[in-house]
Image: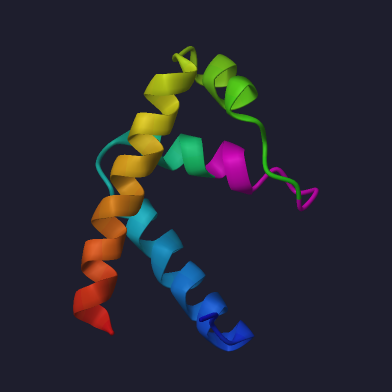
Amino acid sequence: GGFEESEREEIFSLFKKFVSKQSDERMKKIFDIRYNSGNNKITPWRLVAESLDMSIQGVINVHNKCLGEFKRKLVNYV
């Protein structure tokens, strides 16, 4: 099951708000670099990791931890 476009936009908006409130600056930078590169393409993990001087796995771990926390919040929101 997919979401309507308006629902996707609302969830993405909630997600951006969630990320902006996180205390872990790496989290904000990871999502910013990975998804806001401006050319509608997702930045590869390797480049995200290099730009933050982190390992690829470290970047993925922070990313997935954030997504997990957001999903838990989203379940309570819906």
Residue drawn at point x = 44 percent, y = 15 percent: 54
The residue lying furthest to the front in this view is 1
**Magenta stretch containing residue 38, yes or no?**
yes
Image-based side of 13 in relation to 69, left or right: right
Q: Which residues are magenta?
A: 32-40
Quadrant of residue 15 in the image? bottom left
Q: Is residue 41 above or below residue 9?
A: above
Q: Position of residue 69 (x, y in %)?
A: 24, 54
Task: Look at the picture and state if 53 lies above or below 61.
Answer: above
Colour setup of the view: rainbow
Q: Is residue 67 left or right of residue 35?
A: left
Residue 34 position, x and y percent, is: 59, 40
Side of 58 where 50 appears, left or right = right
Question: Per the image, is 45 magenta?
Answer: no
Residue drawn where x is 64% and y is 22% of the image:
47
Q: Residue 3: image x %, image y %?
A: 54, 82
Picture mark count: 0
Q: Which residue appears farthest toward the right when viewing the image?
A: 39
Image-based side of 57 in relation to 40, left or right: left
Q: Position of residue 31 (x, y in %)?
A: 50, 43
Residue at left offset 62%, top offset 83%: 5
> Where's the C terminus, which quadrant?
bottom left
- 28, 66: nearer the viewer: 66
Is residue 41 placed above or below 55 in the rendered structure? below
- Seen at 68% across and 43% down, the residue is 42
